[in-house]
């Protein structure tokens, strides 16, 4: 088996046992990135020398008898909105194309403490605003299964890196489906944890009440292991939970005693592909065969999720991105005439069209005379969506649904229609509004060979149930696109 086909668990075991050196692992993966990433565009930066130096440190530790570290020698790709000290963190935006943070995110410190190797920073929709990674100001990322198609977004680079065999693990961020939707499109496992389970310190903020860092992997066990490493309390993030997620990290296909809910609102919607629906229901049948009970549940308020999300998310984005004014850091226009010209031209030059669109929408819904009509009302609907999920989880343990209404679409197909693009996240955004965990696991392919993902949802801090159920659906290595 080639190194790039190995799971993270297998790599860690082989490095610790001295069967393979971390340097050999990264050399093979770097060679694969050099050979194929020009076509895929998953990475925006890879520092070969730094990666090899880190691998040499790991090998020296192992030679000295130190084999501690749950990710010992395991390469991890990092979405480029997560800060790594002194490594350019662009958010795929001209606004931050030269920004080198003076600190590392909490999740990065945890990875390094467990022996991981940061192999590179991955492409994304600018400031994580998008569903196809077409909004990147730096480059186009392509789906490894078919390069004419998008990888999803906004964490398209991370999903593509794992699907292409460039890294066994990756980190992404999920504000409205930005891990689960690209995981579905690229045929990998992707997980949005319970809000607060993972520190957001060092994640460049988009929507602070919605953002959550989470893992990508090719196996359920690898995704659970990565989440176990990065989760836990952090004094730098007031929203991080004090208790660590209870994850067993050992899973079987036995689903006896668990009840799966099928929300009619997710399966009877216009725009749901018949092939996606059939693949998802076939996966639910596998859960039933494994011993689960299946019943219908109702989520009547989720029909308002898209509108609610794009009010709250844009409002928070407009506030968070106000800091990029050409003064402290980030892009600064040349020869401004005065302070107003400095602000306006720096932001005009630094931000792309989608980011500008969301800033304007956010400013509008927060403006005097419209705050109560839009933003305040959206907060009330958000509460009712969360209440619907709470009622459903009083009856069932897990909710099963599609991760996206279709498989990946062609590059450029929806670029001129923002509403059509927004609707590609119709099944994922409600979990962010409610703060509950969601996981996407591959469950089949359509007639064109493009992956289909099953989305599983549970109540807060029941993340482990999602790994348990997803293992029953797909217990193996989900494979590499080429």
Image (cartoon, rainbow, N blue to C red):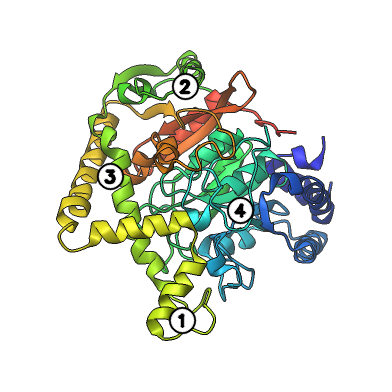
Mark 2 surroundings: few (<14), some (14-19) or many (≥20) residues within 10 A: some
Q: CA distance from mark 1 to mark 4?
A: 26 Å
State yes or no: discs 1 and 3 in contact (Cβ < 8 Å): no
Q: Is residue 194 above or below residue 348?
A: above
Which of the marked residues, 4 or 3, is nearer the chain's N terminus? 4
User: Which residue is disc 3 drawn over?
Assistant: 308
Q: CA distance from mark 1 to mark 2?
A: 48 Å
Residue at image point 42% right, 59% down: 356
Q: Nearer the viewer, residue 78 or 194?
A: 78
Which numbered disc, 1 or 3, marks the residue closer to the eye? 1
Which of the marked residues, 3 or 2, is nearer the chain's N terminus? 2
Which of the marked residues, 1 or 4, is nearer the chain's N terminus? 4
Tag 3's secondary structure? helix
Tag 4's secondary structure? loop
Residue 292 drawn at (x, y percent):
42, 19
State yes or no: discs 3 and 2 in contact (Cβ < 8 Å): no
Tag 2's secondary structure? loop
Q: Is residue 29 above or below residue 326?
A: above
Residue 373 drawn at (x, y percent):
16, 51
Q: CA distance from mark 4 to mark 3?
A: 27 Å
392 left or right, relative to 35: left
Tag 1's secondary structure? loop
User: Which residue is disc 1 drawn over?
Assistant: 327
Residue 139 drawn at (x, y percent):
64, 53
User: Which residue is disc 4 drawn over?
Assistant: 123
User: Which residue is disc 2 drawn over?
Assistant: 273
240 left or right, relative to 14: left
Which of the marked residues, 1 or 2, is nearer the chain's N terminus? 2
Q: CA distance from mark 3 to mark 2?
A: 24 Å
Q: CA distance from mark 1 to mark 3?
A: 33 Å
Q: CA distance from mark 4 to mark 2?
A: 28 Å
């Amino acid at each position: 088996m080639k190194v790039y086909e190995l799971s993270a668990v297998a790599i860690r075991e082989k490095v610790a046992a001295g069967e393979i050196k971390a340097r050999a692992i990264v050399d093979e993966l770097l060679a694969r990135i050099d050979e194929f990433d020009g076509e895929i565009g998953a990475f925006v930066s890879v520092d070969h020398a730094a990666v090899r130096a880190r691998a040499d440190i790991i090998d020296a530790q192992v030679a000295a008898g130190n084999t501690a570290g749950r990710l010992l020698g395991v390469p991890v790709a990092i979405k480029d909105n997560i800060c790594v000290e002194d490594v350019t963190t662009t958010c795929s935006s001209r606004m931050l194309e030269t920004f080198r943070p003076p600190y590392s995110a909490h999740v990065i410190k945890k990875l390094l403490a467990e022996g991981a190797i940061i192999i590179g920073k991955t492409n994304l929709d600018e400031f994580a605003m998008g569903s196809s990674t077409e909004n990147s100001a730096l480059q186009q990322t392509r789906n490894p299964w078919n390069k004419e198609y998008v990888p999803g977004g906004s964490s398209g680079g991370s999903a593509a890196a794992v699907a292409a065999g460039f890294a066994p693990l990756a980190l992404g961020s999920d504000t409205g489906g930005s891990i689960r939707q690209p995981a579905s499109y690229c045929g990998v496992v992707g997980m949005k944890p319970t809000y607060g389970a993972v520190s957001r310190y060092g994640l460049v903020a988009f929507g602070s009440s919605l953002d959550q860092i989470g893992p990508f992997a090719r196996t359920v066990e690898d995704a659970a292991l990565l989440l176990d490493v990065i989760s836990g309390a952090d004094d730098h993030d007031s929203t991080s939970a004090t208790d660590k997620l209870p994850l067993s990290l050992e899973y079987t296909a036995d689903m006896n005693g668990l009840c799966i809910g099928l929300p009619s609102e997710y399966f009877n919607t216009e725009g749901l592909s018949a092939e996606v629906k059939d693949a998802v229901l076939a996966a639910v049948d596998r859960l039933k065969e494994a011993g689960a009970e299946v019943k219908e549940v109702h989520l009547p308020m989720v029909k308002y999720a898209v509108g609610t999300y794009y009010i709250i998310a844009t409002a928070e984005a407009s506030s968070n991105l106000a800091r990029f004014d050409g003064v402290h850091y980030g892009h600064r226009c040349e020869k401004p005439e005065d302070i107003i010209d400095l602000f306006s031209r720096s932001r005009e030059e630094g931000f792309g069209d989608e980011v500008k669109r969301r800033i304007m929408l956010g400013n509008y819904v927060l403006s005097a005379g419209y705050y109560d009509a839009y933003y305040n009302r959206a907060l009330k609907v958000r509460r009712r969506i969360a209440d619907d999920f709470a009622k459903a989880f009083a009856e069932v343990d897990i909710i099963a649904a599609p991760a996206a209404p279709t498989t990946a679409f062609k590059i450029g197909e929806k670029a001129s229609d923002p509403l059509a693009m927004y609707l590609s996240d119709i099944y994922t955004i409600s979990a962010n509004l409610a703060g509950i965990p969601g996981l996407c696991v591959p469950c089949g392919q359509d007639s064109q060979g493009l992956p289909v993902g099953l989305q599983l949802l549970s109540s807060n801090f029941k993340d482990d149930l999602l790994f348990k159920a997803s293992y029953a659906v797909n217990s193996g290595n989900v494979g590499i696109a080429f």
